[in-house]
């Protein structure tokens, strides 16, 4: 049981270290970038929904 816990904790540490290494090597966090991108697209959708459409003249 204890060895299993140690193995799991080591795996978690390795995963976080791998992510940290990729941040350092590329200069950006892929997970954060993904969150930013999704937030950006949500903001664009909101803007598109609330911005007035093209005004039709000549009525």
Image (cartoon, grey):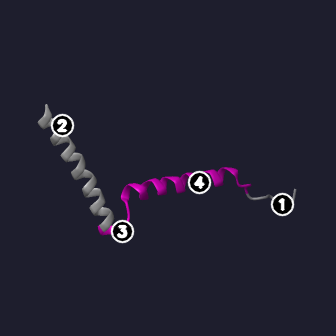
Reading the image, the residue beneath label 1 is 57
Provide the secondary structure element on which disc 1 rests.
Answer: loop
| Distance from Cα at disc 4 to Cα at disc 1 | 29 Å
Residue 39's label in the rendered image is none
Neighbours of disc 2 within 10 Å: few (<14), some (14-19), many (20+): few
Q: Nearer the viewer, residue 36 or 42?
A: 36
Reading the image, the residue beneath label 2 is 5
Residue 53 on image: x %, y %: 73, 55
Magenta residues span 25-53
Q: How many marks?
A: 4
Which one is in front in this view, the residue at disc 2 or the one at disc 3? 2
Residue drawn at x 25%, y 56% is: 17
Specify whether 9 is left or right of 20.
Answer: left
Reading the image, the residue beneath label 4 is 43
Residue 27's label in the rendered image is 3
Q: Nearer the viewer, residue 2 or 8?
A: 2
Provide the secondary structure element on which disc 4 rests.
Answer: helix
Q: Nearer the viewer, residue 57 or 52?
A: 52
Q: Main secondary structure of the magenta part?
A: helix
Find the residue positioned furthest to the top. Answer: 1
| Distance from Cα at disc 2 to Cα at disc 1 | 70 Å
| Distance from Cα at disc 2 to Cα at disc 3 | 32 Å
């Amino acid at each position: 049981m204890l060895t299993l816990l140690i193995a799991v904790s080591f795996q978690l540490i390795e995963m976080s270290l791998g992510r940290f290494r990729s941040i350092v090597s590329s200069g950006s966090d892929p997970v954060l970038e993904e969150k930013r991108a999704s937030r950006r697209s949500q903001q664009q959708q909101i803007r598109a929904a609330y911005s007035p459409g093209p005004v039709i003249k000549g009525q």
